[in-house]
Image: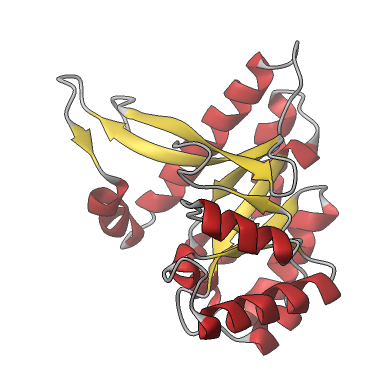
């Protein structure tokens, strides 16, 4: 972090029905000066065990704002940033977020806060107020990796998030297994009735795309359209 060896990659998100580029997710990568690539799977779990992960998240946020600032002469696409569960209990989180985005004179809707479904477990007492504070400041909030853990529809119902991101594990049978299709259809119906936008992650095949279109999934991201 001190040597500025982290860089941010962006994985585009596309409108499911039209294939139009709509937004992107920021993903951190560690590339050493000699070109050695270190996967986030190797260093993020270590960083998560301390407050260092918070420094990394804010580094990504700043990098995203710099990217968006450079785009001010062309159409700017919203970018989502992943935040660790540790931020839920961080004092002045929303104020810090506003301060960084305002420094670059960016509209708040250009940045979306993503927090994983699993990160929310055990934080219920703080989570609702945390999300409301973020949304009141003009940012949107996405629940990431939905379906990767012990998903609770009751829990999602009580969380005032804007977006539900469906984990790629729910597409593992290529949307051709009957039970998988039923589960996915139920999740999309549930989300739509709660007025939540939906994003499918890890879309890699035309079969998955066709099924997601039939479910009126709003956006998709995955190797079928673009790598980070």
Q: Please, is residue 13 above or below residue 68 in the view? A: below
Q: Please, is residue 156 above or below residue 109 in the view? A: below
**Residue 166, visible in the rendered structure:** yes
Which image quarter holds the C terminus?
A: top left
Q: Residue 26: x and y, percent?
A: 52, 39
Q: Please, is residue 223 above or below residue 174 in the view? A: above
Q: Nearer the viewer, residue 198 or 143?
A: 198
Look at 65% across and 34% down and name the residue there: 100
Q: Residue furthest toward the top?
A: 73
Look at 20% across and 20% down and name the residue there: 33
Q: Residue 66: x and y, percent?
A: 59, 22
Q: Residue 14: x and y, percent?
A: 66, 42
Give the colour scheme of this rendering: secondary structure
Q: Please, is residue 20 above or below residue 137 in the view? A: above
From the viewer's perspective, tell me whether residue 217 is left or right of residue 118: right
Look at 76% across and 48% down and name the residue there: 139
From the viewer's perspective, tell me whether residue 27 is left or right of residue 112: left
Q: Nearer the viewer, residue 92 or 143?
A: 143
Which image quarter holds the N terminus?
A: top left
Q: Nearer the viewer, residue 202 or 110?
A: 202
Q: Residue 135: x and y, percent?
A: 79, 56
Total number of numbered discs in the rendering: 0
Q: Quadrant of residue 188?
A: bottom right
**Residue 158, visible in the rendered structure:** no
């Amino acid at each position: 972090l001190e040597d500025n060896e982290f860089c941010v990659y962006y994985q585009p998100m596309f409108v499911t029905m039209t294939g139009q580029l709509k937004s992107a997710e920021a993903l951190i990568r560690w590339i050493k000066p000699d070109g050695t690539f270190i996967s986030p799977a190797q260093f993020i779990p270590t960083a998560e065990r301390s407050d260092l992960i918070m420094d990394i998240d804010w580094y990504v946020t700043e990098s995203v704002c710099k990217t968006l600032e450079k785009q001010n002469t062309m159409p700017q696409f919203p970018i989502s940033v992943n935040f660790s569960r540790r931020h839920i209990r961080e004092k002045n989180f929303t104020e810090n977020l506003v301060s960084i985005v305002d420094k670059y004179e960016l509209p708040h809707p250009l940045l979306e806060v993503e927090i994983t479904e699993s990160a929310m477990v055990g934080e219920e007492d703080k989570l609702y107020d945390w999300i409301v504070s973020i949304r009141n400041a003009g940012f949107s909030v996405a629940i990431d990796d939905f379906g990767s853990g012990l998903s609770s529809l009751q829990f999602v119902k009580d969380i005032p998030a804007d977006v539900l991101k469906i984990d790629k594990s729910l597409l593992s049978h290529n949307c051709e297994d009957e039970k998988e299709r039923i589960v996915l259809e139920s999740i999309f119906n549930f989300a739509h009735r709660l007025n939540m936008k939906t994003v499918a992650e890890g879309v890699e095949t035309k079969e998955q795309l066709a099924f997601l279109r039939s479910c009126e999934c709003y956006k998709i991201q995955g190797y079928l359209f673009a790598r980070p």
